[in-house]
Amino acid sequence: MSEDFYKVSILPYAGIIIKLCRAYTNSQEDFDDYYQEVCLQIWRSRDNFRAESEWSTWVYRITLNVCMTLLKKKKRNVQHFASDYVPEEVGEESGVFDDENLNILYDGIKQLSEVDRGVILLYLDEKSYQEIADILGTNKNNIGVRIKRIKERLKKILDGKIN
């Protein structure tokens, strides 16, 4: 990957990649692996971009796909080696943000399904229902209902955790 490609096509969208990778990982090591894999996949798929949508939409889609794929692979490996697996505690020291409430929100988001995490993060990034549908490869009519259900589920998860 050339430095120019990284500076022009990835770095301006690093915030998107960071937010999504953080929602799918529990350790700095996993986060670094996911981030690196996302950057590699963006570079590999750059010639497939047809400019039918914004580049940021393409970055979101690739990032979500990579994160969900890596998470599924990790789950398969964890099931295979279940006797050796000890879940990591996600505490303040593992948080990326200084804002405790933001860390609590991310911890709550991590309890959602893989797809629901992506939907709520796109919603929190103020993407339109159509943009969310385009990124996820679904239709926009389902997005509104899905967001309402996710918000209800997230509220139950977070109830009493945020001051």
Image (cartoon, rainbow, N blue to C red):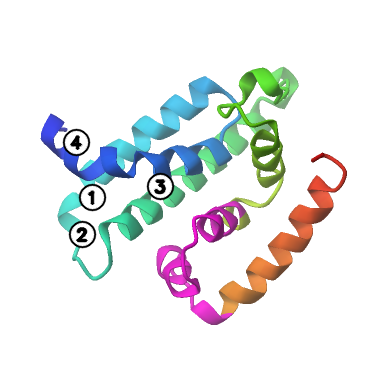
Residue 11 is a magenta residue: no
Q: Which residue is mark 3?
A: 63
Sequence-first disc among 3 and 1: 1
Left or right position of 37 against 19? left
As shown in the figure, which amino acid type bears the numbered disc 2? Phe
The rendered magenta stretch, by its main secondary structure, is classed as helix
Residues under labels 1 and 2: Cα distance? 7 Å
Sequence-first disc among 4 and 1: 4
Q: Which residue is mark 4?
A: 7
Sequence-first disc among 4 and 3: 4
Region in magenta: 117-141
Whether tag 3 and tag 1 are in contact, CB under 8 A, the answer is: no
* Element at label 3: helix
Q: Which residue is mark 1?
A: 45
Residues under labels 3 and 1: Cα distance? 12 Å
Residues under labels 2 and 3: Cα distance? 14 Å
* Element at label 4: helix
As shown in the figure, which amino acid type bears the numbered disc 4? Lys
Whether tag 1 and tag 2 are in contact, CB under 8 A, the answer is: yes
Nearest to the observer: residue 18 or residue 32? 18
Q: Is residue 24 visible?
A: no
Left or right position of 79 against 158? left
